[in-house]
Amino acid sequence: MKKQAGFTLIEIAIVLVIIGLLLGGVLKGQEMITNSKIKRTANDLNGVAAAMYSYLDRYSAFPGDDALADDRWGGAVVGGNGDGDIDGAERPDVWEHLRLSGLVAGSGSSNPNHAFGGEIFVQNGGAGISGTVMCMNLMSGKIAEILDRQTDDGVGNTGEFRQTTGAAAYDQNATNLTLCKKL
């Protein structure tokens, strides 16, 4: 009788355990990366708020709305109308004023990106919040709910952190939500 060559049950079990450990490590690594991005996005929002208030303390106006910005930095810098609101025409100037003042890194007037790839922008009102707000676009529903729970009440249409859809619950399948937080 000829003996058949093949794998024993112990060898197959060992291979399956190794594959399970590798998959577990990959999934845990992905979770750690996502958690890191969430923390970085929350820190970005706090940093933008700190920069906005530092600018207000230093120049007695919000960036973008600063009527003396063109005199202060000259060149092609556009000053705002000084009415206390950051309207649509002043939105791009927010980042240029913050960058020229040295409160945020970079140059120019383009909106910075958050860790999930969308833009961070500042405007007057949004998501049912009056006053100056910081907003982020292209956020997933899952990440939006986590950020809301970390910074506010976890409900999408109440508090100081809201989604623009006006719904109380976050759509867990959404990939393009815009969120706003009161400054």
Image: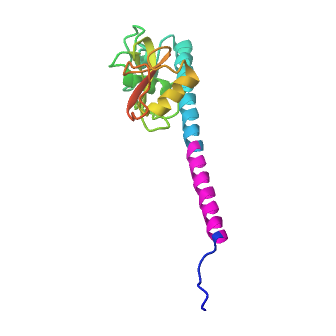
**Range shown magenta:** 10-31
**In the picture shown, does residue 142 fall above or below 1?**
above
133 on left or right of 53: left
Magenta region, mostly helix, strand or loop? helix
Q: How many marks?
A: 0
Q: Quadrant of residue 71?
A: top left
Residue that sits furthest to the front in the current view: 1
| 14 inside magenta stretch | yes
Front-most of residues 13 and 53 = 13
Q: Position of residue 37 (x, y in %)?
A: 54, 38
Is residue 182 in view from this perspective?
Answer: no
Q: Position of residue 52 (x, y in %)?
A: 52, 19
Snapshot colouring: rainbow
Residue that sits furthest to the left in the current view: 89
Q: Residue at x 48, y 12 (%)?
A: 61
Residue that sits furthest to the top in the current view: 83
Q: Position of residue 150 (x, y in %)?
A: 58, 25
Q: Position of residue 94 (x, y in %)?
A: 43, 22
Q: Residue at x 61, y 52 (%)?
A: 25
Q: Quadrant of residue 13?
A: bottom right
| 61 inside magenta stretch | no
**In the picture shown, does residue 29 fall above or below 103?**
below
Q: Residue at x 48, y 33 (%)?
A: 142
Front-most of residues 40 and 175 = 175
Is residue 61 in view from this perspective?
Answer: yes
Front-most of residues 114 and 179 = 179
- For the N terminus, which image quadrant? bottom right
Residue that sits furthest to the bottom in the current view: 1
Front-most of residues 99 and 117 = 117
